[in-house]
Image (cartoon, rainbow, N blue to C red):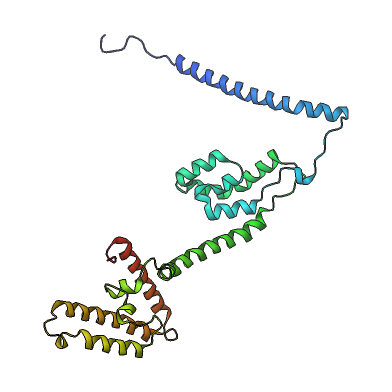
Amino acid sequence: MDDYPDEMPDGSEMISGIVGLFHIVVFYFAIRWVIRLCKRAPETDAVAAGANLPQANEDQLQPKKSVVTCYILWLIAGPVGAHHYYLGRLVHGIIATWTMNFCFVGWMWDMFLIPCYVRSFNKGLTHSQAPYDGSKRGLCIRLPMTLFSIVMIILGLLCYTPTVLHKFGTVDLDRIAAQTQTNPYETLGVSRGATLHDAKSAYRKASLKWHPDRNVGCGKECEDKMSEITKAFELIKNRAGQGSSGRTWEDKFRDLGKDWQSLIMHWGGDGSR
């Protein structure tokens, strides 16, 4: 009938496929066994014949890998495959890097397989009398020092970048903080190390000169100048009143945040005039 196919599978094709796959597997392992046998045959014959083989010193041998080092790398950067790179497992390391070690599943699985990985490397690629690579001591000392140095460099950049840029004249943090047209100290005509008394004297002198009540008809020019003078005096007064002995860490961090905010305003164009 038309409703049924002309040919019905009788399972012979499936059996043929299984038999073919079995032959491929057997053939593969047979080739590997022959290659391994050929590699070992010359060494066995040479030893049996009593040939003088070249000798190597311990420092010329491939050093053994350390399980402790491997676990440290696994703990610090295991999701990106650092322990695989350490053992020369480049393919596994690249795959782990791109997949975060199979979404951390491979990372957890490696915790149990690391001794097997290290044993396989040492047995297959190193001599039984080869020394360990000494990476355990180097990793336990150099890595913390390197991380500490990196952290200190970052903290130093965060804490001192605004001050250094201000000292070299790249950006005027005082002007940006006071929101004045010129530097507040230059506006009042005092030095940067001026005391609060000096700032008050300069402020009174500038006020007498530019106050609108003393300059009839001056109008907007005097008003703008008085606004600049007042802003400059407020910033200098705050800086002089803060001092260094009575400031807490909270005050220092707040001032650092303001300095970075001034830098962002300057680079963004809001503080440049």
Above or below for 263 versus 65? below
For the C terminus, the quadrant is bottom left
Q: Which residue corresponds to the image point at 47% horizontal and 49% vertical from the top-left?
A: 104
Q: Position of residue 96 (x, y in %)?
A: 50, 44
Left or right, residue 24 beside residue 239: right
When asked about the image quadrant of residue 165, the answer is bottom left
Above or below for 44 versus 195? above
> How many marks do you count on the picture?
0
Left or right, residue 130 beside residue 185: right
Nearer to us in this view, 254 or 21 = 254
Q: Which residue corresponds to the image point at 57% horizontal and 53% vertical from the top-left?
A: 73
Q: Position of residue 46 (x, y in %)?
A: 83, 28
Nearer to us in this view, 4 or 150 = 150
Residue farthest right in this picture: 50
For the N terminus, the quadrant is top left
Q: Which residue corresponds to the image point at 35% horizontal and 83% vertical from the top-left?
A: 190
Left or right, residue 256 beside residue 82: left
Residue farthest left in this picture: 217
Q: Position of residue 174 (x, y in %)?
A: 34, 74
Nearer to us in this view, 41 or 169 = 169
Q: Which residue corresponds to the image point at 50% horizontal and 16% vertical from the top-left?
A: 16
Q: Position of residue 184 (x, y in %)?
A: 31, 78
Nearer to us in this view, 180 or 147 = 180
